[in-house]
Amino acid sequence: MDKLAAYYAQRATEYERIYAKPERQADLAALRARIGKIFKGKHVLELACGTGYWTDVIAERAQHVTALDVNDEVLEIARSKKNAGKVTFMRGSAYEIPLQDRAHDALFAGFWWSHVPLERLDGFLTEISSRIK
């Protein structure tokens, strides 16, 4: 496990505290509403789902979500969310997506973009685009 993955595994139980900050509530409400509209009725592939905060928001209105993360620690938390019944959780890397089909018509990667090195961005975008119909 690389350093970044180990960092997130270690912080799994505290990760969502950031969403409880009072000064963020208006922005989070706006994002939840927008995400609900964008993914309504879609089959969503989510990369680096973490503890499933946004997975749960997406799953509320999506047809189905396939949520990927490299850490079992965060996937365990994500599986406990209210809408987890509409989600297939998979252990896997955003760089090596363990899916061969193109069954998804939408992609979500919240807060993941900052972890993609600029020199890998073009190849990464080409690869993930090929996974969406």
Image (spheres, rainbow, N blue to C red):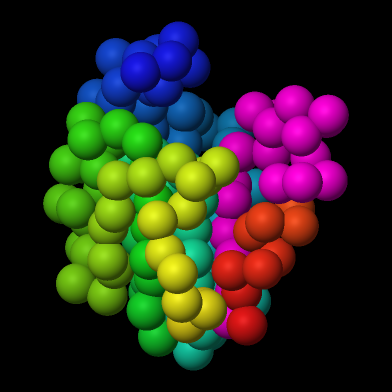
Q: Which residues are magenta?
A: 105-124
Does residue 96 show up? yes
- Identify which residue, 127 or 86, lies in the foreground: 127
Q: Nearer the viewer, residue 114 or 93?
A: 93
Q: Against 30, is 121 above or below?
A: above
Asked if residue 123 is among those painted magenta in the image, a careful observer would answer yes
* Residue 11 showing in the rendered view: no
Along the viewing direction, whichever of 8 and 122 lies nearer the viewer: 122
The reply to whether the magenta stretch includes residue 131 is: no
State the quadrant of the C terminus.
bottom right
Quadrant of residue 71 within the rendered picture: top left
Picture coordinates of residue 35, whole percent (x, y): 59, 67
Q: Viewed as shown, does residue 124 lie left or right of 18?
A: right
**Residue 122: x %, y % from top left:** 83, 46
Residue 107: horizontal and vertical position, in percent? 59, 65
Instruction: Please determine whether, in this image, residue 95 is positioned above or below residue 34.
Output: above
Q: Quadrant of residue 17?
A: top left
Residue 13 image offset from top left, x and y in percent: 24, 25
Q: Is residue 4 left or right of residue 68?
A: right
Residue occupying the point 47% across, 53% down:
97
Q: Is residue 29 left or right of residue 16?
A: right
Instruction: Identify which residue is drawn at 61% across, 38% down.
Output: 111
> Residue visible at 27% across and 75% down?
86
